Image (cartoon, grey):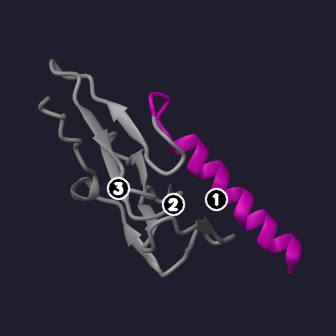
Amino acid sequence: MRKGVLTMILTGWCFFSAAMPPAVVGASDFHCVQLPDSRNSLLCAPPRGSLLKNEKDRYVCGPGQCLRQASGRTICSAVPGGAAALDSRDRGLCDGGCVEATEDQCVTPIPDPS
């Protein structure tokens, strides 16, 4: 039983690590990427959430850890800071249940006017 859980966790981490964009900056609980637009805009995950590219090469976010299933679906833990993993059948196992990662859950920081 313990070996299966460890394999599941490591598999989830490998998918998560591979899906993270190389330009991610920020603290361990806050991730942002600089977009390749004319303003060099930043796009960030919600606090304690995740940011990654989906199968359409677009950035999506979720409240907790996110990963991409072999089917291409991007799922996340519904709990801020929660863990996500895949079982041997590519089914999501997430703290608080799994939710789909979406662009709407990403945030854009507001610059300090001073």
Q: Which of 8/24 is in front?
A: 24
Q: How far apart are marks 2 and 1 (CA)?
A: 10 Å
- On whether residue 11 falls in the magenta region, the answer is yes
Q: In this figure, which residue is indicated by the disc labeled 3?
A: 46
Q: What element carries label 2?
A: loop
Q: What residue type is labelled 1?
A: Gly
**Which x, y percent locates residue 10?**
73, 57
**Percent coordinates x, y for residue 63 in the rendering:** 39, 64
Q: Which of marks 2 and 1 is in front?
A: 2
Please give the residue where the numbered disc 2 appears in the rendered image: 65
Do the residues bearing badges 2 and 1 touch, measured as CB atoms within 8 Å? yes
Q: Which of marks 1 and 3 is in front?
A: 3
Q: In the figure, is residue 34 to the left or right of 16? A: left
Residue at left offset 45%, top offset 65%: 76
Point out the stretch of residues depicted in magenta: 1-25
Toward the left, the furthest residue is: 113
- Residue at screen point 45% across, 33% down: 25
